[in-house]
Image (cartoon, rainbow, N blue to C red):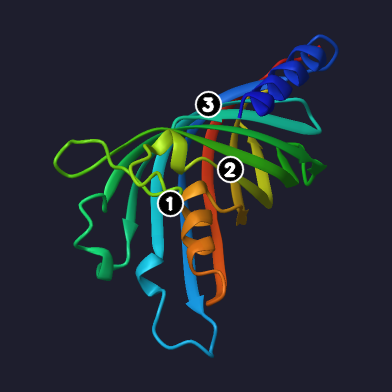
Amino acid sequence: MKKLFVFLMATLCMTTAFAQVSIGGGGFVAGSFSTWSLDKDHPGSLKRYNASHLGIAPFVFVDLKFAELSFGLPLGWLKADSTMSADPNFPAQTLALRGSAYLKLPFSLSSSITLFPLLGVDYDFYLRARRDDDRDAVFPISNSTSNAKAREALNTLWFKAGIGLDTALTDHLFIRTEFLYGLRLPNKMEKYLRDVRDSETKRMFTHGGDFRIALGYRFKK
């Protein structure tokens, strides 16, 4: 986590001194889904570990023509399969800090519209998770730790690709929309649950996507 933010800030400091930049802010909607299944030789189901995480967030971005850096503050709702309804930690309301770094390759479609593919990473650092009774939600991450808080259990790294579109409003102002989809690495809770039943688990598939919209300001030389 610390290394990622050091990298983002160092990149920003070095490039903004030499490059024409754009800045902006807006909001995004994000969804994350995990699906578990057992090896066919084992009876039963791991469906109870299936989870969804939906969130909304304000974010700010800095555009460096061929790169985009952004920071967001997602407020989300973490839900598990209904077979885990007896667990008081689900559902939970979460708050996280997201840092993103993307490479982009812009193509001008007209004098006012620019299209660009995106490829990069997100890192989600969870600040908290709250149960319905307003207590901290806790999660298992090892045989000796079954009550880890969100900042220990849920942090995760994403690899995403997508497409973006800038629509100019004036010489300086533009609207940016982006669609992103990708895969994420298991968090500590999921790694532990997988290790516990490693010989039986056939698949743990974690994926999700974002829709982002923002108002940007482009500095002109």
Q: Where is 108 relative to 16, above or below? A: below
Q: How many marks?
A: 3
> In this image, 133 relative to 171: left or right?
left
x, y percent for residue 64: 77, 25
Query: What secondary structure is marked by label 1?
Result: loop
Q: CA distance from mark 3 to mark 2?
A: 11 Å
The answer to which quarter of the image holds residue 66 is top right
Nearer the viewer's eye, disc 3 or disc 1? Answer: 1
Q: Secondary structure at mark 2?
A: strand
The image shows residue 149, relative to residue 187, as above or below, that is: above
**Residue on which disc 2 sits:** 177
Cα distance in 3D space between marks 2 and 1: 44 Å
Q: Is residue 105 left or right of residue 149?
A: right
**Mark 2 residue type:** Thr
| Res. 217 visible in picture | no
- The residue identified by callout 1 is 143
At a point 59% along the width and 51% down the height, the residue shown is 179
Residue receiving disc 3: 25
Type of amino acid under label 3: Gly
The image quadrant that residue 198 belongs to is: bottom right
